[in-house]
Image (cartoon, rainbow, N blue to C red):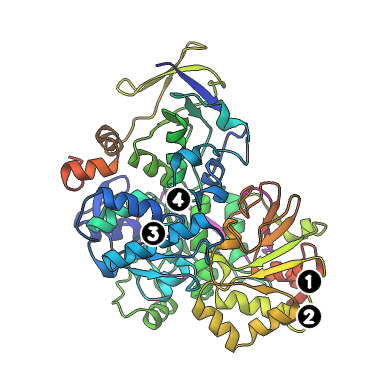
Amino acid sequence: MGKTIAEKILSSHSGKDLKAGDIAICNVDFCFGQDGTSSIIIDSFKKLSVAKPFDKSKFYMIIDHSAPSPNIGVSAIHKKMRDFAKQFEIGLYDIGCGVCHQLVPQEGYVTCGDLVIGADSHTCTYGAINVFSTGVGSTDLAITAASGKNWFRVPETIKIVVEGRLPKGVYSKDVMLHIAKDIGANGATYKAVEFYGDAISAMSVDARFTITNMAVEIGAKIGIMEADSKVLKWVAEHSAREPKPVKADMDAKYYSVKTYNVSELVPQVAKPHAVDNVADVTELADVKIDQAFVGTCTNGRLEDLEITAAILKGRKIHPDVKFVIAPASRKIYLEALRKGYIDIFINAGCAVVAPGCGPCVGTHNGVLADGEVAISTANRNFKGRMGNPNSFIYLASPATVAASALTGKITDPREHKKRL
Amino acid sequence: MKHFARRLKVKDNINTDYVISGRYKFKIQDPKELAKHIFEDIDPDFAGRIKKGDILVAGENFGCGSSREQAPQALKSSGFSAVVAKSFARIFYRNAFNIGLLLIECNTDFIDDGDELEIDIEKGKLKNKSNGLLLDINPIPSVMKKLLDDGGVVEHFRKHGGFKFE
C-alpha cells in the first residue's frame, strides 16, 4: 500500500513503518515558542528537571505577539523569556525581528522533509515548503525542547486539487477562503491536507504559504505541498540544510479527494465572526470600514506589500479609514523600504508599525472601538480577536484590503486591474 | 461529589480565543486570574456561575483556533472536572490531557444546562441523571488515558524518564 506525505515523514522520523491511525514517538527537527506561549513552556520545562534543552540549535524563542511590549504584564513575560534564553544559551528573536512563521523558514531553520512543531497554531505554514509542521501547546513544546521527541498520531489525509488559472485581482488568500467556506471550520479536523493542482504550481512560494498557513482554520493538523523546482530554489536561497523532498505514492490512500476550479473565482471575504463565513466581495459592497490592516503570518510578505503598494501608489486612503501595515519581518521591512513601498504607504496615510502580530491578536497597534469594522489580511476574525468583542472583522487578500481603504467600504480590487 | 452540566449560548466551534481572550492571556500568567475571564466575550456572566466539579458541555469542534494552553488551564482552574463535547479540535485535545483535564466525546444534544451528570470511563458511559438517559462515550485513546492516569504529560515524563505508552 502506498503512503501519503504525512505517513512517510512520520515513518522516517520514528524509524517505524507507519500508516494513518498509528501512534509513534518521533524525533523532531526543530521547535519553537512565541511570547504568548513561552511563559508556560518555561514553567513546564523547569518542572521536567532536565539539565538543558536537547539541542540548542533546534529550539528557539520568538517575541512577536506583543512586540514591543504594550504593558507591564507582557514586559514581565518578555523578561522571563530573555532570562531563560540567557541561562540556557538558547536563541531568541526579540522585538522587531518579525513574526515567527516568517522567521522560521526565512532564517533557514526548516527544510523539505522535516518534522517541526511550534507552540503556535499557525505552525502549519511551512507545509508550503514540504515540511510536516504543526502547532502544539506549551507543555508539548517543553517536552520536545527537553528530549527532542514527541508522540504523534499519524493523520488520515485529504487531497485537495486546485485547478485553473486565477483571474487578475484574485489571489491565494481568496482560494483558501473559498476552500474554508466549502469545507468548514471543522471539515479537516485531525487530518492532513495535501494540496495539488496547476493553480498551486503557478503560485509563488510566498503565495503558497498563505494557503498552508490557514490549514488549521479548517481544523487540519498539517497542510502540505510537494517540493517542486520553485520550492527547492526557495529553500536553497534560505537554508544551508540539505532538503529531503517527500512525495506521496501514486497509490497512497486518501480519506477524501476534493477538486476546485478557480478560473472564475472572484475575490472572497470572510464575514464576522467565523473564517468559514465567506461571501463574494461583490455581495458586500455596502459595508463601511473604519480600519484596514495588512500584515500577519498569512499576508505580511514582500509580495503582499507589493500588491498593496501597487494599489495605493500616488493615492490617499479614505479620510475616515485608519490603515495599519506590519511587514512580517525586519528583512521584509528593509526590502519594502528599498523598493519604495514604505514611502508609498506613508504618503498614502498609512501607519507602518514594527514587524509583529499585535493588530491580529488584539494586543496593541490598532485595537478597535465599540462598533468599529475592520478589514484585515489575517487568518482569524473571531469575536474580540482584534481586542474588542464589540467590533467586527472581515478577512480578505491584501488587494481587497488596500482597495477598501481607498473608498472606506469593502471594495472589489479588480477595479484596479491595470495596477495589478 | 455531584457534577452538573454547564452549557454556553454558543454550541459549535467555540475557539480558544472565546475560552480566554487575548486581552488577558498575553499578559496574565496566573491561571486562577485567567479563570475569572473565561468566555467573557461570548457569555460575560458565565464564569460566575461555575461551581467546583461542574462539567462544561459543548457541541462540535470545541477548542478550535489558537494553541494557547491557557485555555484548558483556565477551564481547570475554574473548577471544571471535565469537558464533554461532540468533537474537539486537535491541539486543544492534546493540551487538555497534557495538563490532566478530562475530555469526553459523545452526543451532547440531550444534555441541558444544570443537568446532573455521571461519567464512567471504564464502562464508556455518561449518565444524565436528570433525564435518565445513558449515553455512549467515544473510547479515550490509550495514550490519553495513560497521560491522565499519570496526572499529565509532565508527571508522565518525570515518572518514566520519557514516554512510556506500552
Decide: few, some or many residues near mark 3? Use Cα within 10 Å; few <14, some 14-19, many ≥20.
Answer: some
Host chain of mark 2:
A
Host chain of mark 4:
B
Query: Looking at the picture, which amino acid does disc 3 mark?
Result: Lys
Residue that label 1 marks: A406
**For residue A273, side relative to residue A61 (left or right):** right
User: Which callout, 1 or 2, points at the residue further toward the start of the chain?
Assistant: 2
Query: Looking at the picture, which amino acid does disc 1 mark?
Result: Leu
How far apart marks 4 and 3 lie (CA) works out to: 20 Å
Q: Are marks 1 and 2 on the same chain?
A: yes
Q: Nearer the viewer, mark 3 or mark 1?
A: 3
Residue that label 3 marks: A80
Decide: few, some or many residues near mark 2? Use Cα within 10 Å; few <14, some 14-19, many ≥20.
Answer: some
Q: Main secondary structure of the magenta part?
A: loop
Q: Is residue A232 visible?
A: yes
Residue that label 2 marks: A315
Figure check: A183 above or below A113: above
The kind of secondary structure element at disc 1 is helix
The residue lying at 49 percent from left, 71 percent from top is A98
The residue lying at 38 percent from left, 49 percent from top is A156
How far apart marks 3 and 1 lie (CA) works out to: 42 Å
User: Which callout, 3 or 1, points at the residue further toward the start of the chain?
Assistant: 3
Decide: few, some or many residues near mark 1? Use Cα within 10 Å; few <14, some 14-19, many ≥20.
Answer: many
Is A35 in front, or is A217? Answer: A35
Magenta segment boundaries in residue numbering: A249-274
Is there a contact, CB below 8 Å, between mark 1 and mark 2?
yes
Please tell me the numbered disc located at residue B11.
none
Please tell me the numbered disc located at residue B67.
4
